[in-house]
Image: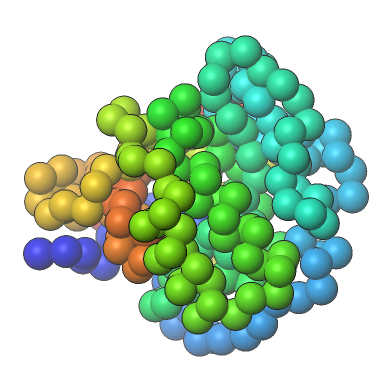
Amino acid sequence: MRQKPLRTFAVRSFAWVVVLGAAWQAQAQDNKTPYPSMAPLDQDLMTDRNAEIALARSAAPEAISRDADVLVLTRHGYETAVKGKNGFVCVVERGWMSPFEGDSAANFWNPKLRGPVCFNPPAARSILPMTYKRTEMVLAGQSKAQMIDGIKTFIKQDLPPLEPGAMAYMMSKEQYLTDGDHHNWMAHLMFYTPLMDGAVWGVDLSKSPIMLNPQFSGAPEPIDVFMIPAGWWSDGTADPVLMR
């Protein structure tokens, strides 16, 4: 069995994802195509470079993010704004890192989305290149269909092999992952694996905290993303999760 629908979580301070499933699916049911095409690029860019750096760093606890590389989005793609020393890379992803199809794709062209992520070194080497590639194609004005074809070629020719231990932090209280009432959804960790049966992780079973993020799932990137709620934001304040 491949993918099951994500469970709904009630979060006391709750409310990407990305990306991220439950919150995005709820909105998509109300409006199937709220963002049918890309808005002017200025709406996706952050004019305050320092604010984007701070937002990117907020994805992970300071003990990690203060020594990480930090990327910012420009009209020409992502560029390194701060050079770190621990191998982590922090970046604010945009809506086009959502799934290409399905309910969770409703925010693909949402210019308000801001998904701060801090990739650990294995993920920075083997997952972050997909962010670079998608962004490159978006800035070139490509359609979703063209992007999918381009990614398939990229996977065959240039994508590094997925490294064991690849994971990322999404613990920013300031993240904007949905237009719903609770924009920041929940603090969570993401673990990247080859495509596999989610039952191996106990995905979506009663009282299991593990969810399958529909971000990639072979459509077309050959990656599964498993998410686990963190329980607190990167600043240390509580984000308790209560499962129904």
Residue drawn at (70%, 74%) of the image: 141
Q: Position of residue 89 (x, y in %)?
A: 59, 30
Give coordinates of residue 76: x percent, y percent: 79, 54
Q: Residue at x 64, y 39 (%)?
A: 91
Type of colouring? rainbow
Q: Is residue 96 above or below residue 46?
A: below
Q: Quadrant of the N terminus?
A: bottom left
Picture layout, residue 32 above or below residue 160: below
Task: Return the residue found at the far right.
Answer: 47
In which quarter of the view is residue 167 placed?
Answer: top left
Task: Please name whichever residue, 81 or 66, is drawn nearer the observer in this view of the structure.
Answer: 81
**Residue under the image location 89 percent in, 50 percent down:** 47
Horizontal side, residue 184 vs residue 242: left or right:
right
Q: As displayed, is residue 83 above or below residue 97?
A: above
**Which of these two is toward me, 121 or 178?**
121
Q: Residue furthest front?
A: 157
Please say whether residue 231 is visible from this viewpoint.
Answer: no
The one nearer the camera, 99 or 204, is 99
Pinpoint residue 186: horizontal percent, then vertical percent.
48, 45
Where residue 146 sits, quadrant-wise, is bottom right
| Percent coordinates x, y for residue 137 in the rendering | 63, 65
Which residue shows up at 55% across the image and 33% down it?
A: 118
> Where the C terminus falls, by quadrant?
bottom left
Q: Nearer the viewer, residue 170 or 231?
A: 170
